[in-house]
Every structure is written in structure tokens, then in C-alpha cells.
Amino acid sequence: MSGPARMTHASTRAAVLDLVRAAGMISRVGLVNATGLTGGTISTVVRGLIDEGLVAETGHAESTGGKRRVMLQLNHFARYAVGVHLDEARITYVLTNLGGAVVARISRAGSGDAEVSDVVARMAREVDALIDSVGVERDRILGLGLVSARPSEHHEFGQALERATGLPVVLDNDATAAAIGEHWSGGVGATSTFAALYLGTGIGAGVVLGGTTYRGPSGHAGEIGHLCLDVDGPECRCGARGCLEVLAGPGAVVAQARADRALSRAAGLAGGRTRAAAPVAADFAAISRAARRGNARALALLERSARYLAVSARALANVLDLEVLVLTGPSFAIAGSVYLPVLRAELDRAFIARAAHPVSVRLSPSAASAPAIGAAAIVLQSELVPRQTGMRLPDDLAAGEPPVFVR
Amino acid sequence: MSGPARMTHASTRAAVLDLVRAAGMISRVGLVNATGLTGGTISTVVRGLIDEGLVAETGHAESTGGKRRVMLQLNHFARYAVGVHLDEARITYVLTNLGGAVVARISRAGSGDAEVSDVVARMAREVDALIDSVGVERDRILGLGLVSARPSEHHEFGQALERATGLPVVLDNDATAAAIGEHWSGGVGATSTFAALYLGTGIGAGVVLGGTTYRGPSGHAGEIGHLCLDVDGPECRCGARGCLEVLAGPGAVVAQARADRALSRAAGLAGGRTRAAAPVAADFAAISRAARRGNARALALLERSARYLAVSARALANVLDLEVLVLTGPSFAIAGSVYLPVLRAELDRAFIARAAHPVSVRLSPSAASAPAIGAAAIVLQSELVPRQTGMRLPDDLAAGEPPVFVR
DNA sequence: GAGGATTCTTCAGTCACTAAACAAAGAAAG
DNA sequence: CTTTCTTTGTTTAGTGACTGAAGAATCCTC
């Protein structure tokens, strides 16, 4: 238990930097207490971070009888990151500083069915415009995060964008990105276990366990759209019945609303009249507006969806032993006020570990642009936070061993 | 990306040992490839392990054009661990070697309502008897693992047992223990992501993500007994409706069977006539036997339970992106053959990430004593495997900082 | 302003790990 | 059998992160 608490250079530096970020403001002594390292080590590590311009001394604490502690803060404008959200109909770009705060933001039309090379060229120009709009030097930008609902389909896209922009590109899915964004922005604790419930046109969840993002072996962790809420429910494209997505997803809400002639007219639903990508999101927004205007039928549809989602959120909280649940994504940005109280009530009533700790349910303050902000946060995290600690343990251990000759 | 891949002494030693265990048989070159460390480091680490008697050279591989590789194996009988499973009605003790193989096993009556001090004294005697039965020296026993359905209620119990036996005691819950036992025994890969679905008188799941046990911030991770499968289902003690436990747990199966006069007689159910702890387990076993004898009604009840459980297992697999699901625990030991095909079919049909990888569903080869074996495995793991890598990041970072005086 | 408390830095020593030379063991070619 | 080459494993010097302890700097109290 005692003895040295050694770690690599990179991860010590990164861990200290992450602590400064997470704490907002902290002294060297505070870092000593938080890390378990000695004062000497912290002293040299902090000097390095100050020399690089990443951290700055920003004041003093009151004395506790001796020399006052010098407070340290992240120099938020030392580095930047670009976040890009590829949605079906739109591409959203944000430039954030080290603290995850948005310093520039633009939104442009989606790719449609244009050639990949053309889209990449256009995106590179739009990224340039984003950066130029605030006059940040290129070499202070750490990289570009590119998120979408199906990142596995965008590998070549990412590589092309990397060549076109000259920035390192990382890919991820929107829900995970949103979770990392919430984590980075400091809304939840540094080591907390939480999920970001993401409601776009689909339903997903980004999962952070004990401060570490969990993606699963194939990157599909947090897939809650196909939780079963009714074994005899309507069929789903996944092959099962009564899936959350079919019962309560934005698509289902919109379908139910369109089937209601009066509501369709009152809310001004687009129906099938616009092009394929947009209408679900647009009509879901229209329904939400109708509910806010007091349309009882619209409100009932949303509340029905919220109850199903609440039960699924409880399942997620039970399985993962969550401490915090953050609602985020474009659809929650619009209808969060309807969903939030329903989810809160459900998790307060029937979360199985609530004797040990409650689940705090919150609406993201930046639900609409959460994926793009998260995309930037992924870059910040991948550049500044401990890589994977520990060592790789390949599963095919015996692979490569020649045939054995037992003595 | 390049540069040294440093780690602490303890974790390098432990990681190498864990690799030797996981691989079964591996050469020094194999360890170099698997760890990324250099030959020199592996050479010294392995020498230390051989000096301690934990590892032994056991033969040669065929030459690939040069010197033959010397193969290394875990010396299974170098150390031992005691595993104890506190069930409602019985206490099961196992003594395992380093490989997790059972070298001695006894089962005694449960604690009933005796005084804690008396029970602890009796358990200490029974542990002594277990150890003496195979004549293992006391100082080669690493510790004692104590698992139950509600370990939080057994803290003092564990401390008393630690004093009485002189062995370090670790506590955990039965489902997590079972998962660790499966992992240690090598049925699943070293870095695999899997869950042990535990069916005793309750329902639980032990979760291992990427080779690391996940317990959750309050130790309640894997709680699937209260997944909702029917929002309008029967009420549950947790406050919700249609929970898995109420619809398909062994208690529910037994209740349904008891309500059936013909089945009760055919299976010889004890009903409410025996004392409180045993009957559910006993009657569930009786129903399973009846189903095996061809009783259609008993089989139908079990298959109904299996279908609900299968849907819940799919939920777990979707949320956690599982690669493997192991069925274990006393009730699966009895009725596993009924449940297994139903779960397999469900996960084959509707697991959402099956395009990326299938979920392999297996019945534990030692389902009945899995908790006790797992308890011993927890001791092995806590003594021999990397502690937590990285550094602790307390959540109350600003705590202890005096008031700040901004410059 | 002396003395004590607290914060922060400096520096020598320690230890895990690497790189590279070396030794040992076997295969292949003559 | 000898030579040469390949592969495996060990030894050794060097590197760098970290600790511990001493010292410097700063602030409070009396």
C-alpha cells in the first residue's frame, strides 16, 4: 500500500493538467493532496505547464498562518480545438478553447448527396473560415473532432479531412461526444459515473464510468434505443418487439402526431412533403412548440414518450449504477422541459440504489450544440488527458508462439 | 506515441503474472510482444517470479530457426485462496489454487439466527478444517473472500472473521464474484467485456468491462432484477411495475407453480410448509426436475421465465456492448439447459451490435459453486493483479483550499 | 523584528525501464 | 564437423520520473 506512486511522464503531466481544469482553480498544495505526489514533483510539473503557457498563476489564497498558496488556473486561451457535428441535414462547426467554451460557431448545410471529395473540400474551407473568424493561429489548434450518429461509416471521410485541413482528426459518435462535452465542461464531477441521454432523431446514451469514457469493444455501448419495454409491443427493425425507439423515439412521436389530423393542422406539420432528411426533426420541433402553446394532444404525445424514456433511463441507471444523468441533444434542447420532470420522478421513485445515492437528472445547458462541443472536447481530452493507463493485454496471447515441446 | 512505457514495479510484476495465468503457457518473447516491454525487463521480472515460486519453466517450443523458446507456466500450487459463499440456508467453502481450480470444498448449514460471534467462531473452525483437509501451509494462503447477496450487511462480519482466521478478508456480492471467477478460470479472454448472469433466488449480473471488474460507485452495478419489461405489469417492491424479478425470477416461477394444484402435486412442492429461507430454492429445483421428467406445465413456466430473462439479457448486452454472457449461479446450475437456448436465440436475433460482433452465450461449467470459487478468485486477483492504475482524482478538489484572494 | 507556520524550490539519491552489447542454443550450409 | 546465421535470453550502463530532506521564501503573530 505504501511506497512510491510512480507513473509515466506523460500521464503525470496530463493528470495534473486535468486536475487544474477540473478544479477550475487550485494551488500546488491542493495538487499534492489530490495526486498523492510530493511537493517537489508538483513543483517541476507545474513549472513545465507554466512554461508551455497552459497554466497560469492567478492570485493567492488567504494565509492559513504561513505563506499564502499561489492559485493556478488553466490558461483557457492557450490552445483550441475544432468540433464538427455531421447531422443528416446540417453540419455544425464550433471552435472551443481549453475550457470547452465556444469561441466561434457556424452551421452550414449538410452533405446531401454530393461527392465525398467535394464535401471534404467544402468542410475544410468552412473550418478555415471558422478559425479565421476569431484570428487564432493554426499551431495553437490541437485537432478536429468529427462526430455523427454512425462514425464507423466516416473513417475515410475523417482521413480525407485530416489531409485537407492539416489537423489531426478523431472520430466518435454523437452521444459519446455529448457525454465527454458535459464531463469536460465541468458540470459533473471529475470521477463521477454518469450518462448523457442523447435525443436527436434517434436515441442513444454516452457513458462515462468513474471519469473514464466507456465505449465498449465495438463502440456500441450505451445503445438504449432497443431496450424492450413491452415484449408484445410493435415490431422493430432490430428484430425484436416493443423497443424504446419504436414506442417513444422522435420518429414515433412524429408518426403518431401525423396520424392525428387536428394536431397535424394545429402544429403545421410538414408531413412527407419536404425532402427525406429533415422532416422528423422539423416536425418534432413543431410538436414541441404546439405543446408549449398549450396543445393538449401534443403535450400528451410528448409525455407518453417521456414516460417510456424514463423507464429506459432507470434501466440504464440501475445497470450502470449512475450518479448523474444529463439530457442532451437537439430534441431535448426543444422538448427538455417536458421530459425532465417525468424522468426525475421516475428515477426518484424506483431507482434501486437510491438508498446509497440518488440519481441527479439535469438538462444540458447547451443541448443543441452538445455534439459539436463534445467533438471538440474529445480532441482536448485525447491531447491533454492520460492516454490509456495500464498495458495492452491482447486476447490472442498464444498467437505467434511456435508449437510447444513439453519437457 | 513513442518513448518509454513506464509503470510501477507492482503493476508490471502483476501484469506479467496475469499474462502468464491468462495465456496458460507463454515464453519470455511472448511476454515481450504482449506487454511492449523490452526483453531485459521481462528477463528480470520473470526471474523474480521464478524465485518466488509463482512461475516455473515447463518445456520448450520448437525452434523457428534459432534458440528454442523456454515456456513459462503459472505454478498453480504456489499459493491458495479461500472462498466462502454465505447463502440464506447454506455456507459453502472452497479452497482454490492459483489457477482458480478447487482443491477442497465443503458445505455446511447457514447461520440461521445464531449470534454473530458464534457463527464467526464456527466459520473459523470450518475454514481450518477445509485447509487441514489438504494439508496446505497457512502462509501460502493469500486470503479469504466472503461473498453474499448483500455484502454491505457483512462488514463487521468480515472483520470478525479476519481476526478469527488471521487471513485477510475481502467482501463482494455473489454476482460480481461469479463473474470474476469465470474471468480468472480463463473461460473468457483476458480483455473481454462480459457479464455473468447470476440466478440464485434473486437475479443479478456481475460485470467485467475490458478485463476490469465494474462495480459502480455504490457497488450496485449490474442490477437487472428491476429492468422494466411491461410498463403496465404487476407492482414490484421497488416501486415500479413489470420488473424482471416479479415477472420471471425464481420466486415468481415458484409462486406460479404453487398456484397450480396439479403441478404442485406432480413436482412435490414444499409450499409454505418448511422454514422461510429454503423453500424457494428447493421448489425451484423441484420444478426443474419436473420439467426434465417431461412435465409440460413445469417446462412452460420455466420457458416463460427464460423469455423474459432473455429480453433483459439483451438489454444488458446492448447497453454494455457485451461480447460474452455466462449463465451462472445455483438456479442456472439446475435449470440452465432450459434457459440457455432461449437466451441464445434472443441474442442472436436482436442484439443490436451483432453486425460488429456476436454475443456468445455460455453456461458456466461450475454454476453451482461459482460464487464461492469467485470469492477465492477475488482474493487471487486482489493480491496478484494490478491495483488501480492511474491516480485517484477526488471529486471535492477544491476542498481544503483556503478562501481565494484573486490578484 | 524575532519566531513560528506554511508554501514552494532545489538537489542528491532511488528505482523501473530502455538500449545495446553479449552469451547461449539451435538451424542451415559447406 | 565447422562455419555462419538466426533467435532467445542476460547483463550492464544510462535515463528519467519520482521521493525525501534540506533550504529559501513568504506571511502571520506577538
Image (tube, coloured by chain):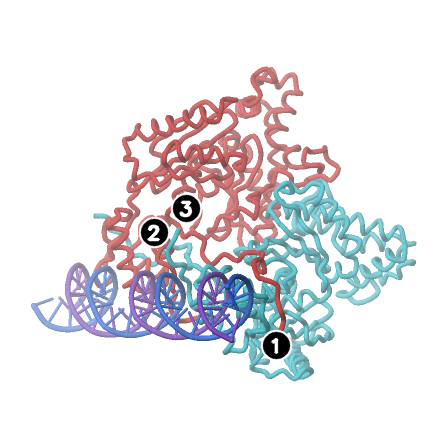
Chain colours: A red, B cyan, C blue, D purple
Q: Which of labels 1 and 2 is toward the front? A: 1
- Residue at 68 percent across and 82 percent down: it is B134
Q: Quadrant of residue A122?
A: top left
Mark 1 neighbour class, 10 Å CA radius: few under 14, some 14 to 19, many 20 or more: some
Discs 3/1, front: 1
In the picture, measured across the screen, residue B339 lies left or right of residue B165, that is right
Q: Toward the viewer: B359 or A252?
A: B359
The Cα atoms of the two marked residues, 3 and 1, are separated by 43 Å
Q: Tell me: residue B124, above or below residue A138.
A: below
Residue A4 picture location, percent across and down = 38, 68
Kindly identify which residue carries mark 3.
Answer: A382
Type of the residue with mark 3: Ser
Q: Which mark is residue B77?
A: 1
Q: Nearer the viewer, mark 2 or mark 3?
A: 3
Of all chains, the one bearing label 2 is A
Q: Nearer the viewer, residue A225 or B245?
A: A225
Mark 3 burial class by Cα count in 10 Å: few <14, some 14-19, many 20+: some
Q: Position of residue A32 (x, y in %)?
A: 33, 61
- Categorize mark 2 by other alpha carbons within 10 Å: few (<14), some (14-19), many (20+): many
Q: Is B404 placed above or below A407 here? A: above
The secondary element bearing badge 1 is classed as loop
Which residue is disc 2 drawn over?
A17
Secondary structure at badge 2 equals: helix
Label 1 to label 2: alpha-carbon separation: 45 Å
> Toward which corner of the image does residue A223 lie, by quadrant?
top right
Same chain, labels 2 and 3 = yes
- Classify residue B201 as left or right of residue A42: right
- Eyeballing the image, is B180 above or below A149? below
Question: In the rendering, at what x and y percent does residue A57 appear?
Answer: 24, 50
- Report, in whole angstroms, how far the alpha carbon at label 2 lies from the one at label 3: 13 Å
Q: Secondary structure at mark 3?
A: helix
